Image: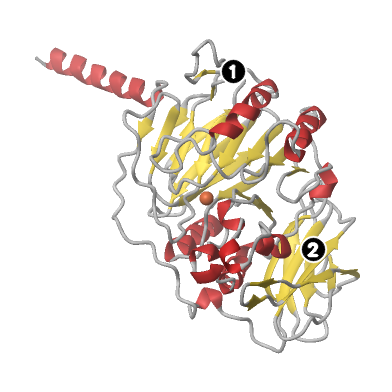
Amino acid sequence: MADHLNRFLVLTVLLGLFLRFCHGGVTSTFVRKVEKTIDMPLDADVFKVPSGYNAPQQVHITQGNMDGSAVIVSWVTQDEPGSNTVLYGTSEDNFEFHAKGKLTQYTYYNYTSGFIHHCTLRNLKFSTKYYYKVGIGNTTRHFWFTTPPEVGPDVPYTFGLIGDLGQSFDSNSTLSHYESNPIRGETVLFVGDLSYADNYPNHDNVRWDTWGRFVERSVAYQPWIWTTGNHEIDFAPEIGETQPFKPFRHRYTVPYKASGSTAPFWYSIKRASAHIIVLSSYSAYAKYTPQYKWLEAEFPKVNRSETPWLIVLMHSPWYNSYNYHYMEGETMRVMYEPWFVQNKVDIVFAGHVHAYERSHRISNVAYNIVNGECTPVDDRSAPVYVNIGDGGNLEGLAANMTYPQPKYSAYREASFGHAVFSIKNRTHAYYEWHRNQDGDAVVADAMWFYNRYWSSADDSITIFS
Ligand SMILES: [Fe+2]
């Protein structure tokens, strides 16, 4: 009898291990208490206007050139233009350098923006903490950031991943979880849909301001790399606003010219050991368009001996097994997926679907209209697709999934959260996703990535915590 029991236990354990490491997909059994996602009210403390005359607000930074030795500092002043200058230096009491920025302002229907400043700090030393201050001459505010290490193949670096953030109570929870994650993210890769101001009457641009104040506590201190989503389009001919991306373009400056791009919606940067390509789901991408031509010329420029990790950011996912935005990314996938496989992209981060999903390494490039082969297949040269549109905006969770779970889907869960992608060296990177309901150190989904250029080994085994 004891023998039978032992055999049964061994079989149960083996079956458990098989289910854990086999190539099947997992739909999380985590049950989230269903609550309505509500925006934080205008008088919430996270939206507080800094005190003092003409105090700089909505301070944010992003990478300012190709290799990370420049930083763009942006901020808004409300009472008057004030100074364009940023003072900065490597010690808290010696702001030995200064840079002069540019000023912009825009109107949107019945809204007039504050005075928006963008200033690029150049020729910074790598791996160095810089202190900076803005608002010279009136109320001055102090911040700091750390530059990345010099670009190189084995440079460790940790990226945070946030998407579709918005400004709800859940958004605040996501940002707080990211900030207190024991694996410290050094730069956020943001996959689009920032403020959701367009969900308010007449795209109330006051909600762009509140969002800028809300995220300042992170983005004034570490760069966020911007991707545009559908909530950045702000195309509203019914109120006379016909210039797409108008608020985003005035408020968020990116270094697109450094990569030969002709628009701020698609561009690339190198940071530490990663080459990051940002694409625009909402700009033309068909053959002969500016984005197509740029991307075609971009892949040959990627040097995996210098930047082994090839990361792509976009808003609308190519692989998505939720019943939301299903196949919205399909036409871009058809255009660009062969390039991604040929060039061995390591990982694609997207958002748009307000939930979490990670794919296996799969491709769907065989289809040529007559052969009927249109099923995704295992492909070790293909990227892993991660949908991280679970920042927590007011539109709420995408909780409705397709069943059965498609084979290409490795893990999916309808919870809000964030992820980190932590590069260790040219061959290994550790990825993990955190849901907001858990403590800071709890990992809900994880995977060790083997670099697609430097290792052909199968890295499809999921590590469940
Ligand atoms: Fe979206």
Q: Could you say which is closer to the camera, residue 33 or residue 258?
A: 258
- For the residue carrying disc 1, how many other residues have a C-alpha within 10 Å: few (<14), some (14-19), or many (20+)? few
Q: Residue at x 80, y 41 (%)?
A: 151
Which residue lies at the image location 50% right of the left edge and 65% below the top edge? 167
From the top left corner, tell me how far across and down residue 87 is, in percent. 85, 72
> Residue 112: in sight, yes or no?
yes
Q: Is residue 19 above or below residue 196?
A: above
Q: Is residue 124 left or right of residue 266?
A: right
Q: Is mark 1 within 8 Å of ligand 1?
A: no
Residue of label 2: 130
Check disc 2 and give the amino acid type: Tyr
- Depth order, front residue of 223/163: 163
The percent coordinates of residue 268 (x first, y second) are 75, 42
| Residue that protrudes farthest toward the left in the picture | 1
- Residue 225 located left or right of residue 411: right
Q: For the point 83% across and 85% down, which residue is it?
A: 137
How has the structure been colored for display?
secondary structure
Residue that numbered label 1 is attached to: 457
Q: CA distance from mark 1 to mark 2?
A: 40 Å
